[in-house]
Image (cartoon, rainbow, N blue to C red):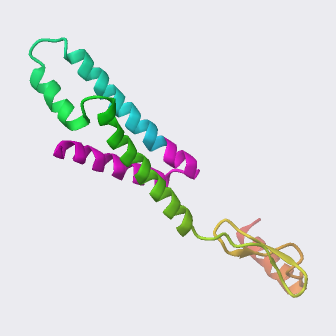
Amino acid sequence: MVPVMITMAAFAIIGAALGLLVRPRAMGVLWPVLLAIAVEGAVQWAIGVMTHQPNREVLVLRLRQIFGDDIIGMIGPVAAATIGAVVAAVLGALTDPKKAEMMLTADGIQRRVGKNGRYVRAEGMVEERAIHAKAESRIDQILGL
Protein backbone atom coordinates (compact mmCIF):
# COMPACT_ATOMS: atom_id res chain seq x y z
CA MET A 1 0.00 0.00 0.00
CA VAL A 2 2.95 2.33 0.61
CA PRO A 3 4.09 2.43 -3.06
CA VAL A 4 0.58 3.48 -4.10
CA MET A 5 0.72 6.29 -1.55
CA ILE A 6 4.05 7.43 -3.00
CA THR A 7 2.48 7.50 -6.46
CA MET A 8 -0.47 9.48 -5.12
CA ALA A 9 1.86 11.98 -3.45
CA ALA A 10 3.90 12.36 -6.63
CA PHE A 11 0.78 12.98 -8.72
CA ALA A 12 -0.56 15.43 -6.11
CA ILE A 13 2.70 17.42 -6.19
CA ILE A 14 2.80 17.46 -9.99
CA GLY A 15 -0.88 18.42 -10.08
CA ALA A 16 -0.33 21.25 -7.60
CA ALA A 17 2.68 22.57 -9.51
CA LEU A 18 0.87 22.56 -12.84
CA GLY A 19 -2.32 23.91 -11.29
CA LEU A 20 -0.40 26.87 -9.91
CA LEU A 21 1.85 27.64 -12.86
CA VAL A 22 -0.24 26.93 -15.97
CA ARG A 23 -2.49 29.71 -17.20
CA PRO A 24 -5.45 29.86 -17.77
CA ARG A 25 -6.37 28.17 -14.53
CA ALA A 26 -8.77 25.72 -16.20
CA MET A 27 -5.89 24.37 -18.27
CA GLY A 28 -3.83 24.17 -15.08
CA VAL A 29 -6.41 21.72 -13.73
CA LEU A 30 -6.93 19.83 -16.98
CA TRP A 31 -3.25 19.08 -17.78
CA PRO A 32 -2.39 17.22 -14.53
CA VAL A 33 -5.54 15.11 -14.81
CA LEU A 34 -4.76 14.17 -18.41
CA LEU A 35 -1.13 13.50 -17.49
CA ALA A 36 -2.13 11.22 -14.60
CA ILE A 37 -4.63 9.34 -16.77
CA ALA A 38 -2.04 8.95 -19.55
CA VAL A 39 0.64 7.63 -17.18
CA GLU A 40 -1.73 5.27 -15.40
CA GLY A 41 -3.18 4.06 -18.71
CA ALA A 42 0.26 3.47 -20.21
CA VAL A 43 1.37 1.48 -17.15
CA GLN A 44 -1.81 -0.62 -17.17
CA TRP A 45 -1.32 -1.29 -20.89
CA ALA A 46 2.33 -2.29 -20.26
CA ILE A 47 1.24 -4.61 -17.45
CA GLY A 48 -1.31 -6.20 -19.79
CA VAL A 49 1.37 -6.78 -22.41
CA MET A 50 3.92 -8.14 -19.92
CA THR A 51 1.53 -10.63 -18.29
CA HIS A 52 1.69 -12.76 -21.43
CA GLN A 53 5.50 -12.83 -21.53
CA PRO A 54 7.61 -15.34 -19.62
CA ASN A 55 9.86 -14.27 -16.71
CA ARG A 56 8.07 -10.98 -16.13
CA GLU A 57 6.08 -11.97 -13.05
CA VAL A 58 8.19 -10.00 -10.57
CA LEU A 59 8.12 -6.84 -12.70
CA VAL A 60 4.36 -7.13 -13.19
CA LEU A 61 3.90 -7.65 -9.45
CA ARG A 62 6.01 -4.55 -8.61
CA LEU A 63 4.18 -2.38 -11.15
CA ARG A 64 0.82 -3.51 -9.79
CA GLN A 65 1.99 -2.63 -6.28
CA ILE A 66 3.06 0.83 -7.37
CA PHE A 67 0.27 1.76 -9.80
CA GLY A 68 -2.64 -0.41 -8.67
CA ASP A 69 -4.18 -3.56 -10.03
CA ASP A 70 -6.96 -2.22 -12.23
CA ILE A 71 -9.14 0.78 -12.99
CA ILE A 72 -10.11 1.13 -9.34
CA GLY A 73 -6.41 1.33 -8.42
CA MET A 74 -6.01 4.17 -10.94
CA ILE A 75 -8.64 6.32 -9.24
CA GLY A 76 -6.46 7.25 -6.25
CA PRO A 77 -3.51 8.85 -8.09
CA VAL A 78 -5.79 10.56 -10.62
CA ALA A 79 -7.93 11.95 -7.79
CA ALA A 80 -4.81 13.14 -5.98
CA ALA A 81 -3.63 14.96 -9.12
CA THR A 82 -7.08 16.51 -9.56
CA ILE A 83 -7.37 17.65 -5.96
CA GLY A 84 -3.82 19.04 -5.93
CA ALA A 85 -4.42 20.96 -9.17
CA VAL A 86 -7.78 22.37 -8.09
CA VAL A 87 -6.53 23.52 -4.69
CA ALA A 88 -3.40 25.09 -6.19
CA ALA A 89 -5.40 26.83 -8.94
CA VAL A 90 -7.92 28.25 -6.46
CA LEU A 91 -5.25 29.44 -4.04
CA GLY A 92 -3.19 30.83 -6.91
CA ALA A 93 -6.20 32.75 -8.20
CA LEU A 94 -6.83 34.17 -4.73
CA THR A 95 -3.24 35.33 -4.31
CA ASP A 96 -2.74 36.84 -7.76
CA PRO A 97 -1.91 40.53 -7.53
CA LYS A 98 -4.76 42.80 -8.49
CA LYS A 99 -4.25 44.73 -11.69
CA ALA A 100 -4.08 48.48 -11.31
CA GLU A 101 -6.96 50.23 -12.97
CA MET A 102 -6.96 53.45 -14.93
CA MET A 103 -6.87 56.57 -12.82
CA LEU A 104 -8.64 59.84 -13.44
CA THR A 105 -6.59 62.73 -12.06
CA ALA A 106 -7.85 66.06 -10.85
CA ASP A 107 -7.16 67.62 -14.22
CA GLY A 108 -9.40 65.09 -15.93
CA ILE A 109 -6.47 63.41 -17.67
CA GLN A 110 -6.79 59.69 -17.83
CA ARG A 111 -3.64 57.77 -16.92
CA ARG A 112 -3.09 54.24 -18.11
CA VAL A 113 -1.09 51.45 -16.52
CA GLY A 114 2.06 50.18 -18.21
CA LYS A 115 3.27 46.58 -18.40
CA ASN A 116 5.24 46.90 -15.17
CA GLY A 117 2.18 48.07 -13.18
CA ARG A 118 3.25 51.69 -12.93
CA TYR A 119 1.30 54.56 -14.38
CA VAL A 120 2.46 55.92 -17.74
CA ARG A 121 2.21 59.49 -18.86
CA ALA A 122 -0.75 60.08 -21.11
CA GLU A 123 -0.73 62.43 -24.06
CA GLY A 124 -1.04 66.06 -22.96
CA MET A 125 0.22 65.55 -19.41
CA VAL A 126 3.50 67.39 -19.94
CA GLU A 127 3.56 70.72 -21.69
CA GLU A 128 6.32 71.36 -24.18
CA ARG A 129 8.64 74.11 -23.09
CA ALA A 130 11.39 75.88 -25.03
CA ILE A 131 14.04 74.79 -22.55
CA HIS A 132 13.23 71.12 -23.20
CA ALA A 133 13.48 71.55 -26.96
CA LYS A 134 16.78 73.40 -26.56
CA ALA A 135 18.25 70.65 -24.35
CA GLU A 136 17.08 67.98 -26.73
CA SER A 137 18.69 69.74 -29.70
CA ARG A 138 21.98 69.98 -27.76
CA ILE A 139 21.94 66.26 -27.03
CA ASP A 140 21.15 65.51 -30.66
CA GLN A 141 24.02 67.77 -31.72
CA ILE A 142 26.46 66.05 -29.34
CA LEU A 143 25.41 62.60 -30.51
CA GLY A 144 25.47 63.67 -34.14
CA LEU A 145 21.84 62.86 -34.81
At 41% from the left and 37% from the top, the residue drawn is 35
Indicate the position of residue 125 as horizontal and vertical percent values.
86, 80
At 35% from the left and 33% from the top, the residue drawn is 39
Image position of 6 (left or right of 45): left
Indicate the position of residue 58 as horizontal and vertical percent values.
9, 25
Image position of 109 (left or right of 114): right
In the rendered image, the quadrant that contains the C terminus is bottom right
Instruction: Tell me the quarter of the picture where residue 97 sits.
Output: bottom right
Q: In this picture, which residue range is highlighted in magenta?
A: 1-30
The foreground one among 17 and 8 is 8
- Magenta stretch encompasses residue 135: no
Instruction: Tell me the quarter of the picture where residue 99 sits.
Output: bottom right
Indicate the position of residue 66 as horizontal and vertical percent values.
21, 37
User: In the picture shown, does residue 88 fall above or below 120?
Assistant: above
Indicate the position of residue 124 as horizontal and vertical percent values.
89, 76
User: In the picture shown, does residue 116 fall above or below 127?
Assistant: above
At 67% from the left and 75% from the top, the residue drawn is 118
The rendered magenta stretch, by its main secondary structure, is classed as helix
At 16% from the left and 12% from the top, the residue drawn is 53
